[in-house]
Amino acid sequence: MTILESLVIRNKEQLNLFAERLGHRFTDLALLQKAFIHSSYAFEQGKDLQDDYETLEFLGDAVLDLTVGYVLIKRFPTMREGDLTRLRAALVQEGHLAVMARDIELGDHILLGKGEDASKGREKPSILSCVFEAVMGAVFFDGGYEAARLVVDKLVVPYIDERKEAMYLADSKSSLQEMIQKHHNEGPVYTLEKEEGPDHAKIFHVAVLFKDKVLARGYARSKKEAEQRAAAEAIKNFDTFDL
């Protein structure tokens, strides 16, 4: 019996519980087990264990690009190609993959070498994101495109609106600048009107002005985001301004 086969037998219950959280019933649990094997663990087992998650990670990266891209086009058929690309990137970048990995307690199942485990490797975004991709590769290998899409529907789709708003908020200041400078030689000015709350939970209130006229206001837990929200509100009502 190979080490991989013995791992599947030993961890069968935990693997099945994880598969339930994932939303896919595996025909071959060895694929899921392989997705959890970090290279540091495989190295410590020596020549008896040649398997780790890296090839499944390679596949899962492509699977996520395809399935998330498909979901976004279906949901936003008129969105520009550049915006689709940026939104997909926000959903599949390392930090967000790590967030989704934590949602399903993926880190509890990763097999790490002693040194990597001691350095809290199962909490590192770089490792969590790679294993998440490997799990998606395992799902695709086991059940094909439709199985992978269903997992994306469960894990990724709930974050789409949040990431879309964050993307547009990040663009709002430059967009408002361009809209005003199209007709004038100067841009808007942002002013901090007030701060409230304790230092650990401070709220910033910002106004965006043009030629001393308040166009809109926004508030958030950072000055930068408050400015972005003010700009977004100004863009929303831009046609009503007499500039």
Image: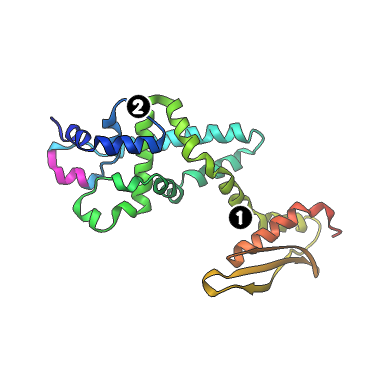
Residue reaching furthest to the right: 242
Residue at 57% over, 36% down = 72
Amino acid at the residue labelled 1: Ala
Earlier residue among tags 2 and 1: 2
Q: Which residue is mark 2?
A: 142
Identified at 55% across, 74% down, the residue is 198
Position of residue 118 relative to residue 94, above or below, is below
Asked where in the image residue 33 lies, by quadrant, the reply is: top left
Dominant secondary structure, magenta:
helix
Q: How is the image coloured?
A: rainbow
Q: Is residue 42 magenta?
A: yes
Classify mark 2: helix, strand or loop. helix
Q: Position of residue 150 (x, y in %)?
A: 47, 31
Q: Position of residue 152 (x, y in %)?
A: 47, 36
Per the image, the residue denoted by label 1 is 170
x%, y% of residue 113? 20, 50
Q: Identify residue type, mark 2.
A: Asp
Give left or right: position of 208 versus 121. Answer: right
Residues rendered magenta in the picture: 41-47
The quadrant of the picture occupied by the N terminus is top left
